[in-house]
């Protein structure tokens, strides 16, 4: 598949220290996306099985034969990744690189400002809570 770059973005509004990158993806591409993210130091990821409706409509993912879903929704996976502002573009680029087939139904990415992060175990907040040992900021500052 030819490489596609996310168009450059002037700045995110509203401004925040952290953003949630929320990607709705084809289920069978998720492990490829998550291992690529892990390689660039993104280790905090949440996934959920969801069902959605977009331009792809009610057409089921083609799996071998022609299978159609019972209703109009297509099975997708939602990946939610909270990162610091400087990491947002790298995460988006990696997701579209690994998730894209070029066919209708590849998915969509939403960027959402996040007010705070709290680590339950320690009570840490903000940057301290968002950082992960051996994560991307450790990798890029080394
Ligand atoms: P601890 O050091 O206490 O283990 P942690 O930062 O590693 O803290 P976990 O408690 O392991 O966090 O995380 C619990 C769950 O929270 C993870 O399984 C994942 O679903 C989600 N999660 C953690 N960090 C993020 C993140 N940055 N973005 C999205 N989901 C996250
Ligand atoms: N920003 C964190 C770090 O660099 C990683 C966040 C994440 O893995 N979602 O350590």
Image: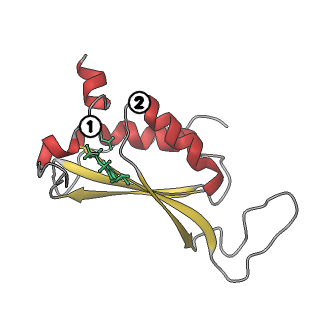
Residue 38, percent from left and from top: 44, 35
Q: From the image, which quarter does the N terminus lie in?
A: top right
Residue 91: which disc? none
- Residue 57, above or below 83: below
Residue 25 left/right relative to 86: right
Residue at numbered disc 1: 132
State left or right for residue 16 relative to residue 86: left
- Circle 1/circle 2 CB separation < 8 Å: no
Residue that extends furthest to the top in the rendered view of this protein: 142
Residue 86 at x, y percent in the picture: 24, 37
Question: Does the image show residue 46?
Answer: yes
Residue depicted at x 35% and y 45%: 44
Q: Residues within 10 Å of mark 1 (few under 14, many from 20)?
A: some
Quarter the C terminus occupies: top left
Task: Give the residue at x 11% y 48%.
Answer: 124
Q: Is residue 23 above or below residue 53?
A: above
Judged from the image, the secondary structure of the residue bearing numbered disc 2 is loop
Q: Nearer the viewer, residue 80 or 105?
A: 80
In which quarter of the view is residue 139 placed?
A: top left
On the question of residue 7 being in view, the answer is no
Q: Residue at x 39, y 40 (%)?
A: 91
Cβ(mark 1) to ligand 2 < 8 Å? yes
Mark 1 or mark 2, whichever is nearer to me: 1
Residue ID for mark 2: 40
Q: Which color scheme does this rendered protein use?
A: secondary structure
- The Cα–Cα distance between marks 1 and 2, rounded to whole angstroms, is 13 Å
Kind of element beneath mark 1: loop
Residue 66: where, in percent of width, then height? 85, 66
């Amino acid at each position: 598949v030819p490489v596609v770059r996310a168009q450059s973005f002037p700045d995110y509004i509203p401004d925040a220290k952290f953003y949630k990158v929320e990607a709705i993806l084809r289920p069978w591409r998720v492990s490829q996306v998550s291992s690529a993210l892990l390689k660039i130091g993104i280790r905090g990821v949440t996934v959920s099985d969801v069902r959605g409706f977009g331009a792809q409509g009610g057409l089921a993912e083609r799996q071998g034969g022609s299978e159609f879903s019972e209703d109009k929704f297509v099975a997708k996976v939602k990946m939610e990744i909270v990162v610091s502002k400087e990491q947002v573009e790298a995460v988006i680029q990696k997701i579209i690189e690994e998730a894209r087939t070029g066919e209708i139904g590849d998915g969509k990415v939403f960027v959402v400002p996040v007010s705070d992060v709290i680590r339950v175990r320690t009570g840490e907040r903000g940057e301290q809570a968002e950082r992960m040992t051996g994560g991307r900021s450790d990798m890029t500052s080394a």
